[in-house]
């Protein structure tokens, strides 16, 4: 049985409880033990890097981030990779979103410098989005953000229209944009192939770590590739069935510190880590 050399955690619905918190003293005790053993800790999330690092103020400079679903990879504060859509793809996707029939659709365009919304977006929704995007600003036209590297569209729409929109993206933008869903009416459009598993692979290559030595946790559609790739993959109890099917093991739900329970098990050499 391979020893674990990397621990990768999704955040919302996985590492964080429903109040967007985690048991910091308990985690730090685990983290110090992992650090002593040379086990790398990676935050792998669809969220913005500036938001993710705010959860780890004391150690953000020494852990790694697979942010924006894998579009932006940082080892501490060193950028290893930053993907981007082609300008043509950005315009084409925007046309689809603005012309399609997707009731209740709201979206952000996410880049390295900031996330952006078009003036006139729903104020209540934007307030919610500020929890996920610590850098968020309005624009009138795409020309204003031509200098940024744009790598994600973050969409929210009525649940029943999610499959319709995802099918349209697959049909109209194959090869230039891919749709991934994390549940609750949320869909991210990403650069094809730039998912969390790809981000982990870049870090693994940097550190000489095999996929069999990775412990990964997730609860959503954007975790599927990462869970399939990792030797020790855990789906949260609160995850949908298709995510549980992609993982090798199950963890307690996010409101019962399922991730920390498994990390403690791993550190003690219990269960599947024996």
Image (spheres, grey):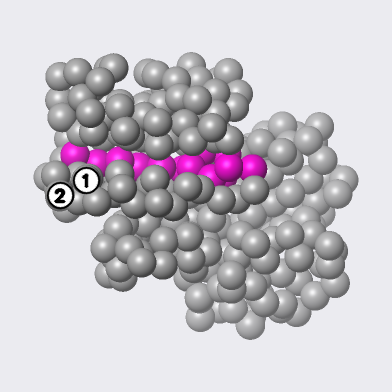
In depth, the one of 161 and 143 nearer the eye is 161
Relative horizontal placement of residue 130, taking residue 100 as reference (left or right): left
Label at residue 234: none
Per the image, the residue denoted by label 1 is 33
**For this rendering, which residue is in front, 95 or 238?**
238
- Per the rendered image, the range of residues in magenta is 5-18
Which residue: 72% across, 32% down? 163
Residue 36 disc label: 2
Answer whether residue 176 is magenta in the image.
no
Q: Please state which of residues 139 and 146 is positioned toward the viewer in this rendering.
A: 139
At x 59%, y 78%, the residue is 145
Q: Position of residue 224 (x, y in %)?
A: 46, 31
Q: Position of residue 183 (x, y in %)?
A: 66, 36
Q: The N terminus lies in which quarter of the figure? A: top left
Q: Does residue 246 appear anywhere in the picture?
A: no
Q: Secondary structure at mark 2?
A: helix
Q: Residues within 10 Å of mark 1 (few under 14, many from 20)?
A: some
Observer-nearest of 188 and 95 = 188
Q: Is residue 14 magenta?
A: yes
Residue at 53% x, 55% y is 47
Name the quarter where the C terminus is drawn: top left
Above or below — where is 139 with respect to 12? below
Q: Hey, which quadrant is residue 228 in on the image?
A: top left
Q: Is residue 152 above or below residue 40?
A: below
In the picture provided, is 82 more to the left or to the right than 121? left
Quarter of the rendering containing residue 95: bottom right
């Amino acid at each position: 049985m391979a020893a674990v050399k990397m621990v990768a955690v999704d955040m919302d619905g996985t590492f964080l409880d429903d109040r967007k918190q985690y048991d910091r003293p308990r985690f730090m005790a685990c983290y110090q033990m992992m650090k002593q053993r040379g086990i790398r800790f990676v935050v792998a999330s669809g969220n913005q890097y500036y938001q993710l690092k705010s959860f780890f103020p004391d150690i953000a400079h020494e852990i790694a981030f697979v942010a924006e679903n894998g579009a932006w990879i940082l080892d501490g504060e060193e950028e290893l990779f930053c993907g981007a859509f082609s300008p043509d793809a950005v315009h084409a996707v925007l046309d689809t979103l603005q012309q399609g029939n997707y009731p209740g659709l709201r979206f952000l365009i996410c880049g390295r410098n900031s996330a952006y919304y078009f003036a006139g977006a729903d104020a209540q929704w934007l307030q919610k989005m500020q929890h996920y995007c610590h850098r968020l600003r309005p624009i009138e036209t795409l020309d204003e953000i031509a200098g940024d590297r744009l790598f994600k569209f973050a969409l929210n729409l009525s649940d029943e229209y999610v499959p319709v929109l995802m099918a349209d993206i697959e049909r109209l933008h194959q090869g230039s944009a891919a749709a991934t869903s994390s549940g609750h009416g949320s869909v991210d459009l990403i650069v094809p192939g730039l998912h969390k598993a790809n981000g982990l692979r870049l870090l693994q290559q940097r550190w000489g770590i095999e996929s069999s030595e990775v412990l990964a946790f997730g609860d959503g559609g954007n975790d599927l590739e990462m869970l399939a790739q990792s030797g020790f993959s855990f789906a949260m109890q609160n995850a949908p069935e298709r995510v549980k099917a992609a993982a090798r093991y199950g963890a307690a739900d996010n409101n019962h510190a399922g991730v920390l329970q498994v990390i403690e098990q791993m550190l003690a050499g219990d269960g599947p880590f024996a």
